[in-house]
Image (tube, coloured by chain):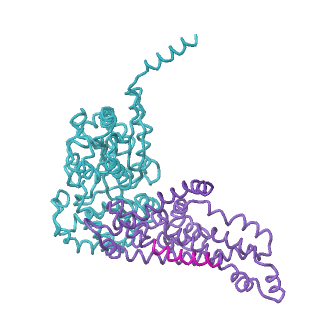
Chain colours: A purple, B cyan
């Protein structure tokens, strides 16, 4: 019995931290979403949908598109690392692709803000190479900028997971396919990817949830309308001191995020079974 | 011998000034506000009142920074703390009203001798709340429209002319909406002053009437049309960025930021400013002292020093290109003509007096922002 008590004591600090710093604020903001001036109701949600429906759809659209592109990018990188025939290229790619993981989102926002502007580095380079004329230059500081930032930052994370999973795929199947004359692209699509879907899904879901919560990138690149939900939440609090609608928006994005987290849970339960 | 040295040590401890205090100054605003206190005001105060130290705490840029200070006060009031952890706070105008209404602040202006040097209206009323005696303005800032004279030879003079100009030059006017900083918010408020069907003076002075909020539909619809033809920039700095790169020819900016960028070489030296009729809003940042500070006396000395003509001249005008918080004539006497005139190169004191407006009172302010969110999508 004392042993069990000791175990309980040991786990208490961690539990307390989770309860006080995560669960309690979550419950409080969930409750706050239904709190109106002197009463309870759905008024905050009505206002949230009235003002920010476009932004909710925009956020889901941006994050879904980014997730899809991240998936393709990660498969391409992982695939080349596994199947690449040129050892030098593989080494260089292996060394390079992880870098964006170590750069904070706000820095990504700052870099892309100057890179993607109308007269930014990207367009200037293209113009000086003669690829386009100055009159055709346009700014990417809108939804495209957000997608580029997300994909650039999150692809390495998913690629890391996927490449690890691909490396542990049984080589015999791959070699058999190659011997029978399958192209490398076909080996990737038909042999390797089906075996790493669980890892890929987990990586993408974690990315989806992360991207739903990023504030700095939309603020730096495009805090206009439509914009991401996080920018709206910050605006409700900072401009109006209105925690009610901010909490409602938070709850809406929680529902969006947890709908994919639910898939994650199902996958991990299936893996354990 | 050992006892003797202990005794000497004890005597030295007793002889040291017992009133050494640490003054905590919380400031909203960009890093430059924290730097101003850490690098200039703090050391000056420590030199003037030896033995005391100043600790500056930055709470973040924009309204969010002031909101954090207000929430800090809310928390300490809620916890019924006897002594609060902030001695002086620097907050935006919008947050002073709630702080006074909730009884958080000390009425200290009468206690300090620089209090008499402020007569401007915005030291008495803050967006519709009477704050007379509770605040000392640190500085006044103003928004205006910056333009590139090589692209715009004859700048518009009014909002109506800006509309004309923007129609003729699609995407050449840029502003940062309302979610990316207050220069865009200010442009929107000026738009409602110009085109709203209500009375602009009621918006600035109150009283708040619900039915007035219905009078902006046409103005906001035209603003939505205007916006599709304009460039939306990422933030206050974003507008200046785009101006400096020639991507837009015109856009609303903070005057002090504009001059600082120009001085740093981040904006081409030929850029200019104008204040369109009927006017655009500006706002002061205020020094406030919580009622429950542990160092009231010292806090008052700090604000008195910070609002003395010398510090206002050297720190506020010369270093930051801000318009002084105390009345201009007291500060002007401390500065040479060239430095003083730098503030008024593009915008004359007369323009500033006639077209420098306050923001609308808080309920109208929020109602306009929300109506904008609804109309301009």
Residue B323, x across and y down, in percent: 31, 45
Please identify the dominant SS of the magenta region: helix
The quarter of the displayed image where residue B196 is located: bottom left
The quarter of the displayed image where residue B369 is located: bottom left
Q: Residue at x 39, y 55 (%)?
A: B271
Query: Which residue is at the front of the view, B273 or B59?
Result: B59
Lateral position of residue A140 relative to residue B62, left or right: right
Q: Is residue B194 visible?
A: yes
Q: Residue furthest right?
A: A179
Q: Residue at x 74, y 66 (%)?
A: A92
Question: Does the magenta segment cover residue B356?
Answer: no
Residue A85, x across and y down, in percent: 80, 75
Q: So how many labels did they put on this image?
A: 0
Task: Give the quarter of the figure containing the C terminus of chain A.
Answer: bottom right
Lateral position of residue B116 relative to residue B170, left or right: left
Residue A145, x across and y down, in percent: 51, 70
Residue A129, x across and y down, in percent: 62, 70
Lateral position of residue A125 relative to residue B276, left or right: right
Magenta-drawn segment: A254-271
Task: Give the quarter of the figure containing the N terminus of chain A.
Answer: bottom right
B180 over B104 or under it: above or below: below
Q: Residue at x 24, y 43 (%)?
A: B134
Q: Is residue B336 visible?
A: no
B116 over A252 or under it: above or below: above
Question: Does the magenta segment cover residue A259?
Answer: yes
The quarter of the displayed image where residue B250 is located: bottom left
């Amino acid at each position: 019995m004392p042993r069990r008590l000791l175990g309980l004591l040991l786990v208490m600090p961690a539990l307390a931290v989770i309860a006080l710093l995560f669960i309690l604020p979550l419950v409080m903001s969930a409750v706050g979403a239904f709190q109106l001036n002197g009463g309870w109701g759905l008024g905050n949600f009505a206002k949230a949908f009235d003002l920010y429906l476009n932004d909710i759809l925009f956020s889901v659209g941006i994050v879904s598109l980014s997730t899809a592109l991240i998936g393709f990018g990660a498969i391409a990188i992982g695939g080349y690392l596994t199947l690449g025939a040129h050892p030098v290229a593989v080494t260089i790619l292996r060394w390079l692709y992880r870098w964006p993981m170590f750069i904070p989102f706000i820095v990504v926002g700052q870099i892309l803000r100057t890179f993607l502007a109308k007269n930014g580095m990207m367009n200037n380079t293209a113009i000086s190479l003669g690829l386009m004329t100055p009159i055709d230059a346009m700014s990417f500081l809108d939804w495209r900028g957000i997608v580029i930032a997300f994909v650039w930052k999150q692809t390495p994370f998913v690629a890391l997971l996927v490449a690890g999973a691909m490396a542990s795929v049984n080589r015999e199947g791959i070699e058999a396919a190659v011997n029978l004359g399958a192209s490398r692209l076909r080996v990737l699509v038909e042999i390797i990817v089906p075996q790493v879907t669980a890892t890929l899904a987990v990586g993408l879901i974690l990315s989806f949830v992360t991207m739903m919560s990023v504030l700095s990138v939309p603020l730096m690149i495009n805090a206009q309308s439509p914009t991401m939900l996080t920018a709206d939440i910050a605006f409700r609090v900072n401009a109006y001191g209105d925690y009610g609608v901010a909490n409602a928006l938070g709850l809406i994005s929680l529902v969006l995020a947890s709908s994919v987290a639910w898939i994650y849970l199902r996958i991990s339960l299936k893996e354990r079974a | 011998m050992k006892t003797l040295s202990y005794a000497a040590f004890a005597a030295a401890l007793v002889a040291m000034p017992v009133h050494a205090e640490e003054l905590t100054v919380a400031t909203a605003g960009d890093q430059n506000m924290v730097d101003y206190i850490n690098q200039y005001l703090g050391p000056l105060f420590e030199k003037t009142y030896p033995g005391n130290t100043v600790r500056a705490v930055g709470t973040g840029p924009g309204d969010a920074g002031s909101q954090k200070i207000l929430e800090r006060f809310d928390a300490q009031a809620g916890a019924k703390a006897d002594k609060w952890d902030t001695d002086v706070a620097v907050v935006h105008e919008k947050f002073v009203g709630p702080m006074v209404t909730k009884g958080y602040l000390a009425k200290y202006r009468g206690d300090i001798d620089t209090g008499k040097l402020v007569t401007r209206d915005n030291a008495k009323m803050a967006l519709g709340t009477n704050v007379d005696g509770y605040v000392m303005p640190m500085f006044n800032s103003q928004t205006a429209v910056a333009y590139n004279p090589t692209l715009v030879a004859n700048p518009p003079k009014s909002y109506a002319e800006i509309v004309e100009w923007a129609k003729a030059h699609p995407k050449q006017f840029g502003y940062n909406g309302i979610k990316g900083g207050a220069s865009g918010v200010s442009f929107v408020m000026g738009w409602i002053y110009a085109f709203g069907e209500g009375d602009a003076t009621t918006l600035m002075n109150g009283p708040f009437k619900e039915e007035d909020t219905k009078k902006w539909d046409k103005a906001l619809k035209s603003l939505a049309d205007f916006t599709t033809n304009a460039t939306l920039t990422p933030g206050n700095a974003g507008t200046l960025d785009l101006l400096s790169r020639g991507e837009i020819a015109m856009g609303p900016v903070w005057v002090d930021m504009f001059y600082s960028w120009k001085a740093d070489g981040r904006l081409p030296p030929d850029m200019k400013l104008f204040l369109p009729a009927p006017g655009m809003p500006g706002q002061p940042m205020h020094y406030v002292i919580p009622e429950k500070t542990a160092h009231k006396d010292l806090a008052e000395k700090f604000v008195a020093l910070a609002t003395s003509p010398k510090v206002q001249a050297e720190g506020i005008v010369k270093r930051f290109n801000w318009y002084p918080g105390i009345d201009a004539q007291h500060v002007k006497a401390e500065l040479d003509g060239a430095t003083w005139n730098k503030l008024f190169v593009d915008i004359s004191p007369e323009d500033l007096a006639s077209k420098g407006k306050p923001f609308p009172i808080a309920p109208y302010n929020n109602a306009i922002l929300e109506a904008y969110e609804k109309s301009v999508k």
